[in-house]
Amino acid sequence: MTTTTIPTANPVTITPEVMLAYWQDERRQTRQLIETFPEDHLFFYSLNGMRPFAELVLDIISMSLPAVVGITTGHWQPTGSFSRSWNGEPKPLNKKDLLELWDKTTGEIDRLWAEMPEDRLLEKQTVFGLGSGPVYSFVLRYIDQEIQHRCQAILYLRSLNLG
C-alpha cells in the first residue's frame, strides 16, 4: 500500500474586503426584496404572530450599525431597537423612508469597514456581553440573521400569492 502525502499550502483566509463584499451582496438581495414587497403589506402583514417585514428590516438595521462599529473599533455598544426613533433617526413609516434608511446604513457600513484593522476579523472578542469568539464568526451570525429575516419575508410573499 502506498501513501500519498498531499502538500499543504497556507490556509485560506477571508480578507475583510471579501467579507464585506459577501455581506453587501446579502444586503443587496434584502434591499431588492424590500423594493418588491407590496407597501400596503410591508408594515402590517404577518403570519402566526410573527413580525411584519418592515420590523424585520428595522431589526437588521438596528443590529448592523452597532455591529459594524464593534467590528471596526472593538467597542461593542448596543444602541437599542426602534420604537419611535433610533440612533437619532425617525422610525420609517413608508417604503421610501425605509429604503433611504437602508441605504444610509449600507453607506455607513462601507465607511466604517474601511477603518477596520486588517487582522480584526481574527481577533477574539466579547460581543455585546453575550459571548466571545473570533469577530468573523459574529459577522457571519449577523449575515445569517439577515438571511433568516429575508426568508421569512419570502414566506409572507408566498402566503400572499406573490412569490
Image: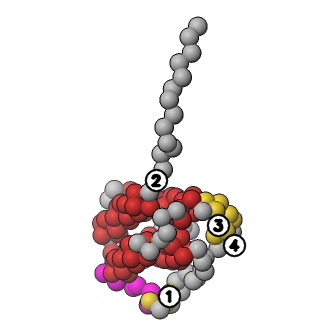
Q: Which kind of residue does numbered mark 1 sit on? A: Asn
Q: Which quarter of the figure has residue 126?
A: bottom right
- Report the disc number at residue 129: 4
Circle 4 crowding by C-alpha within 10 Å: few under 14, some 14–19, many from 20 = few
Amino acid carrying label 3: it is Gln
Marks 4/1: CA–CA distance: 20 Å
- C-beta proximity under 8 Å, tags 4 and 1: no
Residue position for label 3? 125
- Please name which of the two marks, 1 or 2, marks the residue nearer to the observer: 2
Q: Residue furthest top?
A: 1
What residue lies at 54% left-to-right and 65% top-to-bottom?
120
* Residue drawn at (52%, 77%) of the image: 69
Residue located at (60% from left, 77% from top): 75
Residue picked out by circle 1? 87
Q: Which mark is residue 14?
A: 2
* Label 3 crowd bin: few (<14), some (14–19), many (20+), radius 10 Å: many
Residue 92 part of the magenta segment: yes
What's the CA distance linking mark 1 and mark 2? Answer: 31 Å
Q: Residue at x 52, y 83 (%)?
A: 82
Q: Position of residue 54 (x, y in %)?
A: 43, 74
Picture layout, residue 107 above or below residue 123: below
**Tag 2 or tag 1, which sits nearer the N-term?**
2
Q: Quadrant of residue 160?
A: bottom left
| Residue 85 visible (yes or no) | yes
Tag in front: 2 or 4: 2
SS at mark 3 in the image: strand
Mark sitting earlier along the chain (4/1): 1
Q: Quadrant of the C terminus?
A: bottom left
10 Å neighbourhood of mark 1: few (<14), some, or many (≥20)? few
Question: Judging from the image, what secondary structure is the residue with disc 2 in?
Answer: loop
